[in-house]
Amino acid sequence: MIERLKKLIAKSVKSDSLEMNRIKTDSSKNDSFKIDDFKIIENKITASELFFVKKGLDMYRTKDVHNFSITIYKNFEEEGVSYTGSSSAIIHPTMSDEEILQVIEEVSLAASFIKNKYYPLLEPSHKTQPQIISNFSEKPLNEWLSTLTSAIYNSDTCDSGGINSSEIFLNKVYTRIVSSTGIDVFYTTYKGELEFITNWKEDTEEIELYKHIDFSEMDYALIDEKVKEMLIISKEKAIASPTPALGKYNILLNGTPVIELLNYYVSQASAKTVYNGMSLAKLGENIQGDDVQGDLITLTLDPFMKNSTKSSPYDSNGFPVNSVKIFNGGVLNMYHGDLRHCHYLNVEPTGNISNFVIEGGSYSIADFKMEPYLEIIAFSDFQMDTLTGDFAGEIRLGWFFDGTNTIPVTGGSISGNIKKLQKQMYLSKELQKDNNFIGPKIVKLINVNVTGIE
C-alpha cells in the first residue's frame, strides 16, 4: 500500500488536471505549487475490548484498523521570504486510486497556503534504535483480558460502594514511517486503557466518580492500587465537609495534580513554545530564579520509559529519540523538540518525547505533614497556563489538617502562580509512576490562595 501511495503521489505531480494547477494566475509562481516532499505514516491496530456493568460482562469485541496518514510538503517564496507549507490527511486502504488522487490534490492545495518559515526535512539516520518491550507481546491480546479483569475487580469488595461500570481497551499498534527523503522505520507498541466509574453511598449522599488509566504492560499490582485509591476517594468524597476559606495556606498536591503542575517545566523548555514566544526560559539560567529555598527541578525526557503508552523509539517524523536531561538543578541545559522548531532556534533537535522524569526532593511526605496543610488529591477541573504560570483548580477531594484534626473536604478552589511560588516549592522523596510520568508523589507549595465554600 505504501508503494501504491508513493506512485500516486508521483502521478499527481505530473498531472495537469490538478485543481491547484487550474487556479494558477501567475506563471512565475508555478514552483510554489509543486509537491516537494511527502511523509506517510502507516498504522495497523489490533484491538480487544471488554465492557462491564458492575461485574457482569456486557460486551466483548475485537477490531482491526489499518490506515495511512499522508503529509505533503511544499517549499515556496513570497516577497523574498522562504516558506515550507504542509498539510495532512487520512487515507484508507479501501479507497480507489481516483479517491486517493483527489485527497492528494486537496492536501497539496492546502499546503500551498500554509506559510511556515522554511525548515529542512529529516534525513535518514544509520542509528539502530532499540524496540519498545512489553510483556503483552508474550501472548495474544485476548489471553490477557481475564488477568486484566481480575486486577480491576480484585479490590471491589466493599458493601457501601464499588465499580458501577468499566471498559477495557487493549491495543497492539504497528507503526511505519516513510518519507521522500529516505526515512523508513517501523516499531510496535501496546496501548491499554481502563475507564471505570465508582459509586459510593453514605447516609448523606451517593457519589459517582470517573477514572481513566493508561498502561502499556500488564502490572496487576499497579491496576489494583489505582482501583483501591479510587474507592477511597469515593468514600471520602461521600463524607467530606465543605472546604473552609483558608486564605493563603500551605498546599500539598498529591498524585495526578502533581503531574499537571510540573508539566509546566516541560512546556517551558519546548523549542516550539520558546519559538512561539510562550516561554522566556533561557539556556544556562535557573528557571526558578535566584535564592531558591525549596527543591530545584531536575527533569529528564525518557522515550523508553517502562509501562508508558507514550514510549516510542522514533517521533512522528521518524527522528530517532534518546533520553535527554533538560533541567539540572533548575538550570535549563537544552531545549527539546522536533527538527523544525529546533532549526528555528538553531539548536540540536531531540525529537518529540512525551515521557518525563522529575527527581524527588529532600523531604519525606511525613515531614510535610508535621505542620497544618490542605492536601488535595483530586480536582474537578485544573487549569495551568504555561505562558503566565497561573494555575487554578476546583477541589474535588482533599484533606484539611489544622494542627490537631484531619478531615476530608470538598468544594472551593485554589489558585496561584508557579513563577511566584517555585522558590518555595518542595518535592517529596517518595515517587509515583503514572503512565508517562515518574516524579514526586507530593509537591508542597507555600501561601497558595484557598477559596472555601464555608
Image: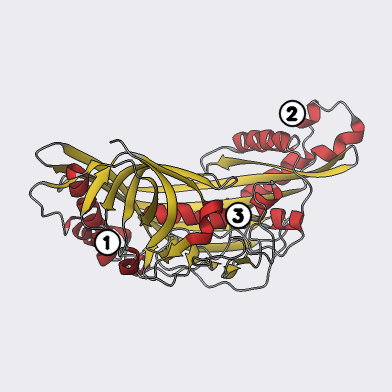
User: Where 101 falls versus 400 (above or below)?
Assistant: above
Q: Which residue is mark 2?
A: 19
- Image quarter of residue 413: top left
State yes or no: discs 1 and 2 in contact (Cβ < 8 Å).
no
- Image quarter of residue 157: bottom left
Q: Which residue is mark 1?
A: 144
- Quadrant that contains the C terminus: top left
Gap in angstroms between the C-alphas marked 3 and 2:
42 Å
Residue 113 as seen in the image, left or right of residue 436: right
Mark 2 belongs to which amino acid? Answer: Glu
Colour scheme: secondary structure
Q: Which circle's residue, 3 or 2, is located before the other in the chain?
A: 2
User: Where 327 falls versus 392 (above or below)?
Assistant: below
- Give whichever of 250, 109 is nearer the camera: 250
- Give whichever of 276, 436 is nearer the camera: 276
Q: Name the front one of labels 3 and 1.
A: 3
Secondary structure found at label 1: helix
- Give whichever of 123, 9 is nearer the camera: 123
Q: Which residue is mark 3?
A: 268
Gap in angstroms between the C-alphas marked 1 and 2:
50 Å
Residue visible at 44% across and 61% down in the picture: 437
Gap in angstroms between the C-alphas marked 3 and 1:
39 Å
Secondary structure found at label 2: helix
User: Where 222 falls versus 420 (above or below)?
Assistant: below
Q: Which circle's residue, 1 or 2, is located before the other in the chain?
A: 2
Is the residue marked by circle 2 packed among few (<14), some (14-19), or many (20+) residues within 10 Å? some
Q: Position of residue 66 (x, y in %)?
A: 47, 48
Q: Position of residue 371 (x, y in %)?
A: 32, 61
- Image quarter of residue 208: top left
